[in-house]
Image (cartoon, rainbow, N blue to C red):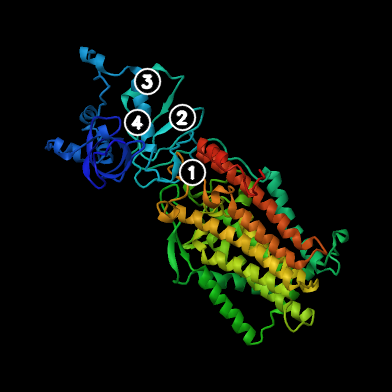
Amino acid sequence: MPSRKFADGEVVRGRWPGSSLYYEVEILSHDGKSQLYTVKYKDGTELELKESDIKPLTSFKQRKSGSTSSSPSRRRGSRGSRGSRGSSRSRTRSPGRTPKNSRRSASASHQPDIKETRREILEVKLTPLILKPFGNSISIYNGEPEHIERNDIPRKNTQERFILSQDGSYISTEYSLRPRREEIKLKEIDSKEEKVVTKGPTSPRTFEVTTPQKKEFGGVPGVTLIMLGLPVFLFLLLLMCKQKDPSLLKFPPPLPNLYDLWETRVCGIYLLWFFVQALFSLLPIGKVAEGTPLVDGRRLKYRLNGFYAFILTSAVIGTSLFWGVELYYVYDHFLQFALAATIFSVILSIYLYARSWKAPKGELSPASAGNAVYDFFIGRELNPRIGAFDLKYFCELRPGLIGWVVINLVMLLAEMKVQNRAAPSLAMILVNSFQLLYVVDALWNEEAVLTTMDIIHDGFGFMLAFGDLVWVPFIYSFQAFYLVTHPHEVSWPVAAGIIALKLCGYVIFRCANSQKNEFRKNPTNPKLAHLKTIHTSTGKNLLVSGWWGFVRHPNYLGDLIMALAWSLPCGFNHILPYFYVIYFTILLVHREARDEHQCKKKYGLAWEKYCQCVPYRIFPYIY
């Protein structure tokens, strides 16, 4: 193996790809296999250079103009002024380029032909895509040109965006050069082989796709059916669960009078619950984290105090029990609370849709499609805020998730009262413990929600408002609600097996999510050095080993195993307690399909290569 010429940390001169200019760079690392040096320019740009493109500082004479010491991005910025445009371009002319309006001299025969020039230009355009690969990367893979969406993340060092179009697709590079005359000349020579779309803005921007957004959930008919059907289905499930025999043969259950479902006091208690949780979220405790970059480059700040809100809520509930407050009232008026939450979610959705028309275009959700019904469901505005209070982020974890735990506690106390028990049943204890662990884990790892599809892609409309405020607390607590009137005794050996299943699912769920979040925050973490990755054209890497090499969504697999463990304590007398598992499986399979579509659109050929490395989606050996 040839010995390396330059050491790590050494300051040298590196040739900027596609030009004859050398800039001061720092050697970061050296790849013994490819014999490429990873260097860092003064503006933060990291590229890979051959040894022949690197010169010692002593081999250069100091120029008075200092042009060689300027960073590439600074020089590109200086070329934007009209007064220096001509001189700048002449200095950055590539070696294989003849001066304009000059006759080809005899020395031109030593220059590369047009094919070589084309290859050099393509190398210039693709070289900035090859960032510093990790030592554990199995390949450097740029993928196919991809669509650039409104929610794409602008890079910190991006001075310009260079777009290469093929078959109606676009590719966004991390770093780019200004369009050169060779590109225009080659485009005129062979427009069939390559189409070059260039733009020269000096400020970061994102190119939007003009094709209409694909409607999910069956389009307008599908979302209309969901919005009308879900509330009705929710109440039918709750009514069936309260029957003595909750068999599907008894469907539909007897319907109550409409006026029996409404109680003003219940509505007041629910509003009090919502606004108390909002007050807890505004307390200046807990760290502040930044979300993913928006279209304009901004990163919203979020107060991470969900776990503290849970502690404060527990203290309030404990104090209420100590003072003799009867929580059985919640169980006795469970349908009324569900109706109050449903009405509140609808009113909130109407407010969100109305205020979205005042939001700037850049703050709208990439999932919105321009149809009133569909956008009301999916949400038009991506991050609706009242001052610093983020409505979507708050509803995602606080009133519904913490309310789920409170409802479970209510059901535990109601079981003791209805069944005249001195202590709750083992089945009820298992359900409460399992779901308490799930909620505490979510609140403790609250920052992870900032990178979920709900936050970065979907707007805040009826889908998330109803899901967070109604579906989560009143359906996820369904097993505990079922056990109040349908007791089931669980032996300790069976309980031990269920606990083992729950822990197995939790380990998969937590380890997979922790590995993903750590990789997103700090890909160079030495703890992740053993993981293999595939590089993509967006500058990000895809994990193809560890938990994420087992299946594409190991966190979904762990989630489903835990969901099954929640239902098993209810026994097998009726299928009703297993509705959550069935529903959750359908939800995650559909969500996985949405993820698959977004990733294929975003990563292109890199995603196809990833799918070859990790063929199984959620379940091992099942496509």
The residue under label 1 is 150
| Position of residue 348 measured from the top left corner of the image (x, y, whole percent) | 61, 60
Q: Is residue 565 left or right of residue 94?
A: right
The residue under label 3 is 186
Give the mark nearest the N terminus, 2 or 3: 2
356 and 85: which one is in front? 85
Q: Amino acid at mark 3?
A: Leu
Give the mark nearest the N terminus, 2 or 4: 4
Give the numbered dot on residue 165: 2
Marks 2/3: CA distance?
15 Å
In terms of secondary structure, where does tag 3 sit?
helix
| Position of residue 547 measured from the top left corner of the image (x, y, whole percent) | 55, 52
In terms of secondary structure, where does tag 2 sit?
strand
Whether 425 is drawn above or below 82: the answer is: below
Q: Amino acid at mark 1?
A: Arg
Residue 267 in sight in this render:
no
Residue 13, quarter of picture: top left
